[in-house]
């Protein structure tokens, strides 16, 4: 896991990772499963997990539309 890697060992740790499309898809799948089991699939669920998903969606949507918003910000009257 990345949190267990020391800074000096980071390059060798990255060299051992699987960067093929299947490896990346597997990593995304494992991340989704960890998120789902930690925040969504719990006995006493709260709004924390869903709030994080919505906050991530808002941030990604803002980043995707930033160029359009940047041009609108400079137009004062038209």
Image (cartoon, rainbow, N blue to C red):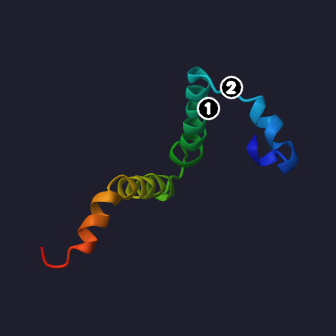
- Identified at 80% across, 43% down, the residue is 10
Indicate whether 61 appears above or below 9: below
Tag 1's secondary structure? helix
Depth check, front residue: 23 or 49: 23
Report, in whole angstroms, how far the alpha carbon at label 2 lies from the one at label 1.
9 Å
Q: Say which residue appears at 50% left-offset and 58% top-offset.
A: 48
Q: List x then y, in percent, for residue 27.
A: 61, 32
Residue 27 is tagged as: 1
Q: Residues within 10 Å of mark 2 (few under 14, many from 20)?
A: few
Q: Residue at left 45%, top 51%? A: 53
Q: Circle 2 is placed at which residue position?
A: 18
x and y percentages locating residue 71 in the rendered image: 27, 65
At x 59% / y 26%, what residue is drawn? Answer: 26
Q: Whole-percent x and y of residue 76?
A: 19, 78
Q: Which residue lies furthest to the bottom in this view?
A: 76
Above or below residue 22? Residue 69 is below
């Amino acid at each position: 896991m990345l949190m267990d890697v020391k800074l000096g060992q980071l390059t060798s740790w990255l060299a051992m990772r699987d960067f093929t499309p299947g490896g990346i898809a597997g990593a995304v799948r494992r991340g989704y499963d960890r998120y789902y089991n930690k925040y969504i699939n719990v006995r006493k669920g709260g709004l924390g997990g869903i709030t994080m998903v919505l906050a991530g969606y808002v941030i990604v949507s803002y980043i995707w539309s930033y160029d359009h918003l940047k041009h609108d910000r400079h137009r004062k009257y038209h």
